[in-house]
Each structure stands twice: as structure tokens, then as C-alpha cells.
Amino acid sequence: MRTISAGVVRIATRGPGDVSGLMTIIDSGAIDPTSILAILGKTEGNGGVNDFTREYAVTALCTALAPRLHLSPQEVEQRIAFVMSGGTEGVLSPHITVFTRREAEQGTAGVSSKRLSIGMAHTRDFLPEELGRSAQIAETAKAVTVAMNDAGIADPADVHFVQIKCPLLTSERVEAAALRGSTTATTSAYGSMAYSRGASALGVAIALGEIASDVRDDDVLRRYDLFSSVASTSAGIELMHNVVIVLGNSASSASEFEIGHAVMSDAIDCAAVIAALNSVGLGIAPQAIAGRELVNIFAKAEASPNGSVRGFRHTMLEDTDISSTRHARAAVGGLIGGLAGTGAIYVSGGAEHQGPPGGGPVAVIARLAD
């Protein structure tokens, strides 16, 4: 049986173009650049259609890694999965999380429990008219299965977080569809982010058996009773396919890390955050747990669509100055940051079909310290 070792490093950044922390770690020998499989980042942009910080961060990373990998920056972007999530409102701190994977010696896996494993897959490129619809759902489900196999994870119960980078619509893409005689799910670039995120999440739910496969186009952004408990999807302008990263625990992994998760029912569900911490043997800050070290927390945030949280009205959906996703990231980031003892956590807005309405998945990675 193939044995792998997955690694995770969280690195603070001074700006979206700051690659110094990663380069220092590579130069120290702590990370072999050829082992980097994915980089997830939080940047201080607005998280919207025009958030240039995401592309800026990816360009900076690809340019810096290119000579280390003896590849062009374009080839680096094809080799490594980059998922940049804009928006570090409130106490959220800009950072990147680097995931590595290498072959491990046979017989070193499954010492006493399943350990962190990571797998990756890509869908085909989508036509603009396919975004937010059944084609994107079906292709995402296929890619999740491929990524699970890549990670050596057979049981869907061992999958604790599925990060997806998905496309969005622009006016040019909408026009291109119209010239072919096709219509898109929406003509709004901003609205298309929700459609793409939602369809991608439903694909995850189907692949993991969380919902039945008979999902229709009309169910996207309407049937909020259909959701995945582990999906985290982020839309960006820089691609036309889905990048799928599966994180879970596998008996074939020799990693010194493990991952667990819980599901927040709303934006103030501290019990779920504590449950996620407990799932990997951690407690709330300051987390003085022998043999355990917090690496990072990954969560989704969404303004409750009914306009209230536990019976009290909120105004996140009515604020014409600040997007509701920015409110939600700040609220959930503050809650998790307080319990985790750090603002360097990955909280992404827009949780359509990612957890119950107003809530979302929260996953925790811990290192088993020596």
C-alpha cells in the first residue's frame, strides 16, 4: 500500500505579495519546494469580484517558486493548487497555509490512528452557462472522488474538509454565452460567485453521500436544506475550472498531523468550534494540551438568510455600505479567534450549501508534538 506523509505550515504575511516567510523556510530546509501540493491563503482584499489581492498573491508565489522548481511561473500555477480567499476583516490576520506531500517509508503509516492526508483533482473547464448548474455539480462530484483516491481515503467519514476554488462570471463571459445562444444562471458577476460556490458544494455533498444525486439546477441557492458538512468553496476570476483539495485522515498516512471538524449551526455557535478543537485533542485557548499543537482552523461564514440569529434581528443583509460576507467573516473570525487564541485562521465568506443556512463547517488541524 502506498504510504504518504502530509505536512502543514502556517506562515504570516505582511501583504499579498509577501513571500519572504515561505522562502526563508524553504532556504532553511524545513520545506522541500518539490513537495508543495497546495497553498491556501487569506489576503486583505475585499473578497469580491474585483479583489486583485488574490491574483497578486498567486503571481508573487509562482514567481518566487519558479526558480526553486525549475519551472516557469505559469507551470508552477499548474503544478500547485493555489486558493486565495480575500477578506481579513476584524481580527483575521493575513497568512498562507502550505500543504506538502511526499512518499513515506513503507510500514510507517497507521501507527495507532489515521493521520492527515491530502489529495487534489481538477475538473474540466466550464462554459459560462454551466456555472451554478448541474454540469458543475456533476463534474465537481467526480473530482472529489478522484481527490479522495489521490489522498488514499476510502471512507467518506474520514473526509473532514474539502476546499474548492471555482470560477465566476464576468460581463465578457456572459456575453460569450449569449453569442452562442445560451443564458447564464445570472448576469451579475457578484451573484455568480454564490451560484458557483453553491453548485460546487452540492457536488461535494453528492460525492460524499451527504445528499442524493438527483439535484436539479433550480435547487442551487433555493434548497438550502441540501448542503455539505465539510465543503468550503471560494470563487475567483482567475480560472474556469474547479480545483478540488480533499483533506482527511487515512491509515496510509505517516503524517504527524491530524484533522477533525464540526458544523456551526449559526455565526455564534461556539460549542461547534470547541467540538472541532476537541476532535483533534485540543481545547480552547491557551490550549496547553500535552502532545498537541494547533496548526490552523478553517471555517465558512454566512449571514443567516432569514435575517436573525437565535431570534434576534441582524442587519448584515441590509447594509448597503458593507457586504454581508464581510460582516460574517468578521463575526465568525472573532468568535473562532477568541476560542483559538489567534486571528491567523482561515475564515471564508459565502457559505451557500456549505453547512446549514447561517452556519458552516469548521475544521481543525493539529500537530502531534514530540
Image: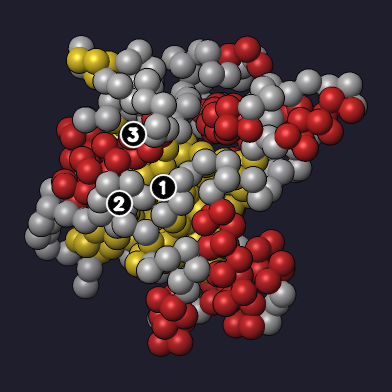
Between disc 3 and disc 1, whose residue precedes? 1
Residue 321 vs residue 239, the one in the foreground: 321
The quarter of the picture where the C terminus appears is bottom left
Reading the image, the residue beneath label 2 is: 92
Between disc 2 and disc 1, whose residue precedes? 1
Give the residue drawn at x 56%, y 54%: 52
Image x and y of residue 1, in percent: 54, 60
Reading the image, the residue beneath label 1 is: 87
The residue type indicated by label 3 comes to Ala
Bin the neighbour count of mark 2 within 10 Å (Cα to Cα): few under 14, some 14-19, many 20 and up. many
What is the quadrant of residue 300 in the picture? top left
Image x and y of residue 93, in percent: 31, 57
Give the residue drawn at x 69%, y 43%: 241
The residue positioned farthest toward the right in the image shown: 180
Cα gap from disc 3 to disc 1, whole angstroms = 10 Å
Bin the neighbour count of mark 1 within 10 Å (Cα to Cα): few under 14, some 14-19, many 20 and up. many
Find residue 66 and name its label.
none
The residue positioned farthest toward the front in the image shown: 321
- Residue 364's place in the image compared with 196, above or below, is below
Between disc 2 and disc 3, whose residue precedes? 2
Give the residue drawn at x 64%, y 27%: 188
Q: Are marks 3 and 1 in contact (CB under 8 Å)?
A: no
Residue 253 vs residue 83, the one in the foreground: 83
Find residue 328 and name its label.
3
Bin the neighbour count of mark 3 within 10 Å (Cα to Cα): few under 14, some 14-19, many 20 and up. many
Give the residue drawn at x 57%, y 62%: 56
Q: Are marks 2 and 1 in contact (CB under 8 Å)?
A: yes
Residue 126 vs residue 116, the one in the foreground: 126
Image x and y of residue 236, in percent: 59, 45
In terms of secondary structure, where does tag 3 sit? helix
